Structure formats: structure tokens, C-alpha cells
Amino acid sequence: MRRLAVILLAGALLRGGCERATPHDNVPPPRVVSFSPAITEMLFDMGLGDHVVGVTRYCILPEGVQRRVVGSQLNIRAEPILAVNPDVLLTQTAPKHFETVRKLSPDVCIAHFRIETLADIGGAMARIAKIVGRPSVGRRAKAGFLAKLKNVREKVAGLNRPRVIFVTGYKNPLAAGKATFINELIELAGGANAAGEKYSGWRRVSIESILQLAPDVIVCEADPATVDETRRYFEKLTASSGRKVRVCTVTDRHWTIPTGWIADHAAGRMARFIHPELRPGGGE
């Protein structure tokens, strides 16, 4: 009986692009494989984690929660995915990489997400919740996300816009250029993304290139074990350039995962990195 219900559900999902407007009492809730750290976090943040039956090895789960690991973006195999009997697979990876899943189990609906901008994050919340039959949950999450971003934007309105660069690591660093949610985050928080003037997307950059972009603020995501070393490196480097540059380090990998965490935590912190006067006491 459940198998028949699942088949009917899969057919409805396929006809509607994997989306159901409302849940149905006679149809079991969809079993979801989340093949994306961002999507996994959104599901659990919205209280939809009970739908999740499989995740990637890079997904961050709430404390005390466990789910079957079914692969990663670098290791996509149909057998582990199908072993958890999913109805839906949600992913940021191109659907072509799941062709074997389609062939072996045509009833599994594969929904692809592009999450590159802040607007994409809110849109993903709404779409994810609709896919699992809880559209009102997604609408509330999206509205809350956008309201938090608006609050930060209003706090920095009218302030000067220092030049900012966001990088990951200091050995062969990656910089966030335009067309990234980090670029938008910097601008929303009252800065100008210096890397966005030259680069699009995430780009490997040399230290010389960073100095040539003449940043006023460098925000570096570092491994917790090397955070002090990273800070000292950039402080010494910028001091030798003759420019006064503020160096800020972060260690939480959520900074580079496009989820609601960006509005809950990163936006306000980025604003204070760029504008220390916003901190309690008005200083650094």
C-alpha cells in the first residue's frame, strides 16, 4: 500500500516540478535525500529534518542528529542513494550527475537548486518547503530571512563604504568576487567588494593581487587551528605595504555555506567588521 502511495506521490511531484502545494493525509510525507550542505541545513532550520533520510559527508547536522551518509559531490553513486528509498533528491549539483539514479529508479524526483545570491537563499527556503508539502513554513522562513537582511542594511545606510576583501585561507587563498552571496553580503553590510572589481565568482588569487586591490578590510575564513597564524600573516603583510588595513578572521565554515545563518549571524558581524563604530562601545 505504501509503495502505491509513493508511486502516486512521485508522479505528482514530477508533474509539478517536484513541488506539492499542500500535504495530503493519504500520501506519506516524502523521503528526502539532501545532496547539499546548504539544503540540509535549511531543511533542519525550518523544522523539516524529519523528511531527511540521506545526506552528504559534508553536511552539518544539528547536535545529536544522525542521518545516513550517501555520498558527496565528489563521489556520486546511485546505490547508496537508492538504499535509503528516497522519493525526492535535492541538490546543487547538476542533474546530469544523477542519470544512473534516474535510470534505476525513475520515480525519484531530482530537484536542482542554484544558490549563488542572497535572493537565491530565500527562494530556496520557499521551494524546499513547498516540495515537502509545507509551503507556509517556507514562506515564513523566507520572509524572516529577508527582514533580518533589511535590518542590517538600514543600520549601515549613509555610512562610508570601505574596500573589503573576503578570502578563505592565506595559503593560495580564494577570494569572493561578484556574482556571489559574499559579494552581496559585503555590500549589504556597508562595504565595497574590492575583489568584485576584478573577479567574478570564487577565484584563486595571489597575495600580490590582494594588495593591488588596496583593501581597507580583509575578512579571512581560517581553520581554527591556524586562526592566529592567519591573522598575524595578513597583519604583517599589510603593514609592509604601508596601508592601514583592518584584518578580521572567522573560523565558522557557515560563512561560505548559503543558508539562513548568513542573515542570523554573518550579516551583522560583517557590518561590525566593516564599521567598528557599530560595535558596543563604538570601538574595535
Image (cartoon, helix red, strand yellow):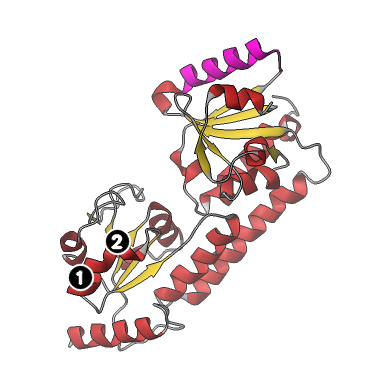
Q: Which residues are magenta?
A: 227-243
On the image, which quarter does residue 191 sit in?
Answer: top right
Quadrant of the image containing the N terminus = bottom left
Query: Contact (CB < 8 A) between labels 2 and 1?
Result: no
Q: Position of residue 55 (x, y in %)?
A: 29, 56
Q: Secondary structure at mark 2?
A: helix
> Which mark is drawn over residue 97?
2
- At 29% across and 61% down in the image, what residue appears? 97
Q: Residue at x 38, y 52 (%)?
A: 37
Specify the principal SS of the magenta part.
Answer: helix
Picture mark count: 2
Task: Tell me, for residue 157, which label it has, or none.
Answer: none
Instruction: For marks 2 and 1, give the CA distance.
Output: 18 Å
Q: Viewed as shown, does residue 240 lie left or right of 206?
A: right
Q: Residue 242 or 63: which is nearer the viewer?
A: 242
- Residue drawn at x 65%, y 42% as measured from the top left: 186
Q: Which amino acid lies under the numbered mark 1 shown in the image of this protein? A: Asn
Instruction: Say if residue 279 shows up in the picture.
Output: no
Residue drawn at the location 63% of the way across and 38% of the way down: 198
Above or below, comparing residue 63 to residue 105 in the picture: above
180 magenta-colored: no
Q: Nearer the viewer, mark 2 or mark 1?
A: 2
